[in-house]
Amino acid sequence: MKVRKMFLLSLCLRAFVVSLTVASLLLPFSALAQQINDVTVQNRNGTAGVFAIRNARIVTVSGPVIESGTIVIRNGKIEAVGASVSVPAGATEIDGSGLSVYPGMIDLSTSMGLVEISSGAPGTVDTSEIGDMNPNAQAIVAISPHSAHIGVTRVAGVTSVLSLPTGNVISGQAAFINLNGSTQREMAV
């Protein structure tokens, strides 16, 4: 009986030592994993670091268009915008030559303006044509500038969308539209 107790005590002690050893070996990795996770979350959310977009055409909300300006973004927030903004030391520089920057989000995969909410009267669904090959179909022709979806989406911060026809092998031509406009021509970018 005494030998059995000693044997069990020995096993428990051995298991405790092994557990303690494994824990002490894994503890630094746990801290490292947390640091990596923090950086990964920041990078995934686009919030880590300082970035400067230089030489871009900047369309502002309330002022004139800046033909060749700089936007400084620090930790995911816009810090400065202008024609004579200096780039902070250590910032990741992005050449915006030939590019335009707009003050809002752009959705590049939607059927905005082609589908309407049913509100009493039947809603419309103008996303596809009959047949598999419709390269001639143009989404801009079917866009409804007064769609209920547009106002709600614009309030959420989306300023432009690529509205896509769907459902066929070649569905037709997408329309890149600005969500501010009362006619198809005003909305077309």
Image (cartoon, rainbow, N blue to C red):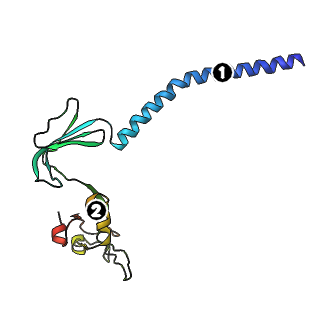
Q: Residue 7 at what x, y percent from top left?
A: 81, 18
Residue drawn at point x = 16 percent, y = 53 percent: 60
Residue 167 versus residue 92 in the image, above or below:
below
Identify which residue, 32 or 134, lies in the foreground: 32
Amino acid on which the number 1 mark rests in the picture = Val
Q: Residues within 10 Å of mark 1 (few under 14, many from 20)?
A: few
Residue 134 versus residue 49 in the image, above or below:
below
- For disc 2, the marked residue is 154
The image quarter containing residue 6 is top right
Q: Residue 97 at what x, y percent from top left?
A: 13, 45
Q: Residue 24 at what x, y percent from top left?
A: 57, 21
Contact, mark 1 vs mark 2 (Cβ under 8 Å): no
Instruction: Give SS at disc 2.
Output: helix
Amino acid on which the number 2 mark rests in the picture = Arg
| Outermost residue to the right | 1
- For disc 1, the marked residue is 18
| Outermost residue to the front | 62
Q: Nearer the viewer, mark 1 or mark 2?
A: 2
Residue 91 versus residue 97 in the image, above or below:
above
The image quarter containing residue 75 is top left
Residue 155's disc is none
Residue drawn at point x = 17 percent, y = 35 percent: 87
- Whole-angstrom CA distance, mark 1 to mark 2, is 60 Å
Residue drawn at point x = 18 percent, y = 55 percent: 61
Q: Residues within 10 Å of mark 2 (few under 14, many from 20)?
A: some
Q: Residue 141 at what x, y percent from top left?
A: 21, 74
